Amino acid sequence: MASAGNGGSGEHHGPLDQFTIKRFVEIDLGGFDASFTNSSLLMVAAVVVIFLLTTLGMGRGRLVPGRLQSVVEMLYELVANMLGDVVGGRAAKRFFPFVFSLFTFLLLGNLLGLIPFSFTFTSHIIVTITFALVIFVGVTILAIIIHKHKFLGFFLPPGVPMWMAPLLVPIEIVSYIARPISLAVRLFANMMAGHSILHVFGGFVFALGFFGFLPFAFIIALYGLELLVAVLQAYVFAILTCLYIRDAIYLHHE
């Protein structure tokens, strides 16, 4: 959540309070907590916005696109070019629905979290690590299906002498296993840090009152920067996913 201040209740709120999970409807499935929370609400909101954006924007398919259609076409071309440049071939078209859905969902999650008193579900490591693990397991299974035992060659770079294999193979394996961790932590850390900074400076503006004009102008600039970070982090997550798909299909030495 990107709240701008503490309000007038006098109750103190720390910068990390905005990341608190709040249960709206408690659901217990055999000891498993499946409650509907503020995080669930924003995820549903992101899906609804994507559905409305794509259906209303592309429903008529006008020759001269309107605003919504232009936005959808821009997103479509962005993901299509990303897959074409990184993956290429028929695989780019095959994985387009997945990457497009992933990118738009994360993008809407980041952007909706910038609305004051909202909630950013991508600022929780459990959400980002789930996405990262799904991608990691999926591309690993894909690589094994395509290459079978040759997949193990991924952990030995081409042209490396066999006597160096005992040293390089463990390094490559650790690097491969670290992929979902770095993918998840990058998105989670950037969103949490940015929103926390906005909250802290928003508190300064509120405390300064009339004299907070200059800090308020700085907040506006910082908000614009956070908007850029929200878009950029969704893009980075998507393009790294494309890179992992490419590695799974071609291996890094082909």
Image (cartoon, rainbow, N blue to C red):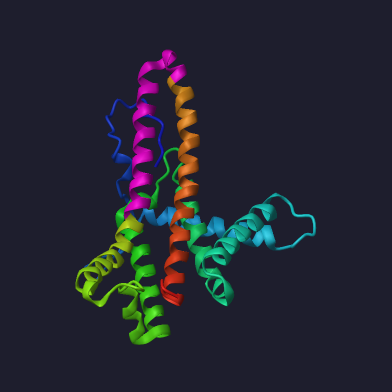
As rendered, which of 146 and 116 lies closer to the eye? 146
As rendered, which of 125 and 17 lies closer to the eye? 125
Residue at horizontal 40 percent and vertical 73 percent from the top? 139
- Residue 23's x, y, as percent? 31, 53
- Is residue 208 inside the magenta stretch? yes
Query: Which stretch appears magenta?
Result: 185-214
State whether residue 246 is above or below residue 109.
below
Q: Is residue 8 visible?
A: yes
Quarter placement of the N terminus: top left
Judge from the rendering whether residue 149 lies leftward or rightward of residue 225; answer left or right.
Answer: left
Q: Residue furthest right?
A: 63
- Residue 106's x, y, as percent? 46, 56
Q: Is residue 115 visible?
A: no
- Residue 214's x, y, as percent? 46, 18
Q: Residue 117's image quarter?
A: top left
As rendered, which of 51 and 77 lies closer to the eye? 77
- Is residue 87 inside the magenta stretch? no
Residue at horizontal 19 percent and vertical 73 percent from the top? 166
Residue at horizontal 42 percent and vertical 71 percent from the top? 247
Q: Main secondary structure of the magenta part?
A: helix
- Residue 26's x, y, as percent? 30, 59
Q: Residue 53's image quarter?
A: bottom right
How many numbered marks appear? Answer: 0
Judge from the rendering whether residue 54 lies leftward or rightward of residue 223; answer left or right.
Answer: right
Judge from the rendering whether residue 72 lies leftward or rightward of residue 49; answer left or right.
Answer: right
Q: Residue furthest top?
A: 211
Residue at horizontal 67 percent and vertical 57 percent from the top? 57
State whether residue 181 is above or below residue 224.
below
Quarter placement of the C terminus: bottom left
